Amino acid sequence: MFRQLLDKVQGADVPMITSLLIFFVFFLMVGAYLFIIDKKHVQYMSNLPLEENN
């Protein structure tokens, strides 16, 4: 299916492949960040709107 789309649209293969690669790189970077981030910071940020300290 993907190959048929590339065959029908002339000159669209480079932008389509580039955007797909950018999406996957961004997705992998966000996934890696979620595993690396400090869990205490996540807990602090999730409780921040509920705290009454000014």
Image (cartoon, rainbow, N blue to C red):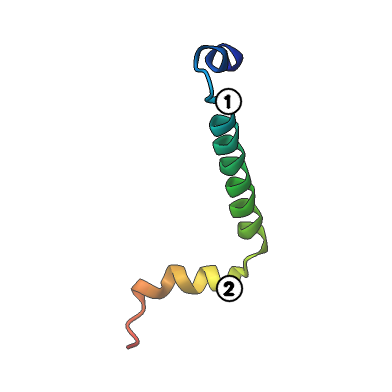
**In front of the other: 51 or 20:** 20
Residue 33: name its quadrant: bottom right
Who's the residue at 56% across and 41% down the image? Answer: 23
Location of the N terminus by quadrant is top right
Who's the residue at 58% across and 17% down the image? Answer: 2
Mark 2 or mark 1, earlier in chain: 1
Who's the residue at 49% across and 17% down the image? Answer: 9
Judging from the image, what secondary structure is the residue with disc 2 in? Answer: helix
Q: Is residue 6 above or below residue 17?
A: above
Whether label 2 touches label 1, CB < 8 Å: no
Q: Which residue in the structure is indicated by mark 1?
A: 13
Q: Taking 36 as reference, is 11 left or right?
A: left
Amino acid type shown at disc 1: Asp
Residue 3: give its label: none
Callout 2: few (<14), some (14-19), or many (20+) C-alpha neighbours within 10 Å? few
Residue 48: name its quadrant: bottom left
Residue 14: name its quadrant: top right
**In front of the other: 11 or 2:** 11
Residue 18 position, x and y percent, is: 59, 37
Select label 2 or label 1 by which is in front: 1
Location of the C terminus by quadrant is bottom left
Amino acid type shown at disc 2: Lys
Callout 1: few (<14), some (14-19), or many (20+) C-alpha neighbours within 10 Å? few
Judging from the image, what secondary structure is the residue with disc 1 in? Answer: helix
Q: Is residue 35 above or below residue 50?
A: above
Q: Which residue in the structure is indicated by mark 2?
A: 40
Q: Is residue 16 above or below residue 52?
A: above
